Image (cartoon, rainbow, N blue to C red):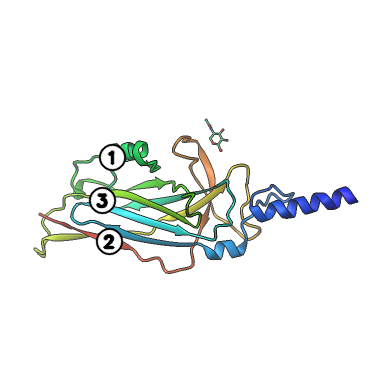
């Protein structure tokens, strides 16, 4: 009985710090932690070459092994440059995968949209914040009928996915949507990720590029 008692205390105290595998397979994100999650975005710079900034903020008490993935769809009017992203990966540690080959030269009307998998990494200085700055580029557009000389490209909000190695269940209860996506930029096997629906209003952000 005494041993069992200690065992329970161990589970509880490790549970506070995050992921320990309990009998029901639940590894430990609290409802309070989930409520602390926010996501905000901005687009910096002007013209064809922009930076898409995504900020995930949360209570810093999250499990060390928790991985975050942002699945960002880009419409046909914009693209991420795989060569630029590869060199940023070396220089700054930015971790982004693209779900398809990208034709950098194609105009918007000959392109299709695609998705970027963005793996934010934690800043040891500020464990509350995951910030990623991903360069994106506008494609050339046909002159518009209205002759306004520019085209607006809407960037929809990313999907926010979480996982922790060895945990099938991050949340205690309720129906959760699991999504297959690459485990990491270094490991392209598909992992199960938990999709998080953020309560706050997720505005689209947009950029305007010259057309014609
Ligand atoms: C990729 O990650 C998964 C999940 O963490 C792991 O099970 C698998 O062994 C990894 N594969 C490689 C090649 O490292």
Gap in Å between the C-alphas at discs 1 and 2? 21 Å
**Res. 113 visible in picture:** no
- Give the residue at the far bottom of this rendering: 201
Q: In the visual, does 59 lie left or right of 41?
A: right
**3D distance between C-alphas at marks 3 and 2:** 11 Å
> Of the residues tagged 1 and 2, which is closer to the observer?
1
Q: Residue at x 60, y 59 (%)?
A: 175
Q: Could you say whether the residue bearing mark 3 is in a helix, strand or loop?
A: strand
Q: What kind of element bears circle 2?
A: strand
Q: Which of the marked residues, 3 or 2, is nearer the chain's N terminus?
A: 3
Give whichever of discs 1 and 3 has the lower sequence position: 3
Q: Which image quadrant is residue 35 in?
A: bottom right
Q: Residue at x 10, y 54 (%)?
A: 212
**Left or right, 49 with reference to 25:** left
The tag on residue 206 is 2
Residue matched to label 1: 84
Is residue 151 found left or right of 173 in the rendered image? left
Q: Position of residue 126 (x, y in %)?
A: 48, 55
| Crowdedness near tag 1: few (<14), some (14–19) or many (≥20) residues, C-alpha within 10 Å | few
Q: Report x, y in % for residue 89.
A: 36, 39
Q: Quadrant of residue 62?
A: bottom right
Q: Name the disc covering residue 78, or none.
A: 3
Within-10-Å neighbours for mark 3: few <14, some 14–19, many 20+ = many
| Quadrant position of ligand 1 | top right
Residue farthest along the right direction in this orientation: 1
Estimate the x, y position of residue 3 in percent, counting from the top left: 87, 48
SS for callout 1: helix
């Amino acid at each position: 009985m005494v041993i069992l008692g200690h065992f329970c205390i161990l589970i509880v105290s490790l549970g506070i710090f995050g992921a320990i595998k309990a009998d029901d397979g639940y590894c430990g994100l609290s409802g309070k932690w989930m409520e602390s999650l926010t996501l905000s975005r901005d687009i910096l710079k002007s013209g064809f070459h922009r930076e898409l900034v995504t900020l995930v903020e949360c209570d810093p008490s999250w499990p060390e092994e928790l991985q975050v993935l942002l699945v960002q769809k880009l419409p046909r009017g914009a693209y991420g440059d795989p060569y630029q992203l590869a060199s940023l990966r070396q220089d700054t540690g930015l971790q982004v995968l693209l779900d398809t080959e990208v034709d950098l030269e194609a105009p918007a009307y000959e392109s299709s949209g695609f998705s970027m998998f963005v793996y934010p990494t934690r800043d040891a200085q500020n464990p509350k914040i995951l910030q990623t700055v991903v360069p994106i580029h506008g494609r050339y557009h046909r002159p518009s009928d209205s002759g306004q000389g520019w085209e607006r490209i809407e960037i929809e909000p990313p999907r926010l996915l979480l996982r922790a190695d060895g945990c099938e269940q991050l949340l205690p209860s309720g129906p959760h949507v699991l999504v297959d996506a690459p485990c990491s930029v270094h490991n392209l096997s598909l992992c199960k990720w938990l999709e998080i629906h953020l309560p706050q209003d997720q505005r689209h952000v947009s950029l305007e590029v010259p057309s014609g």
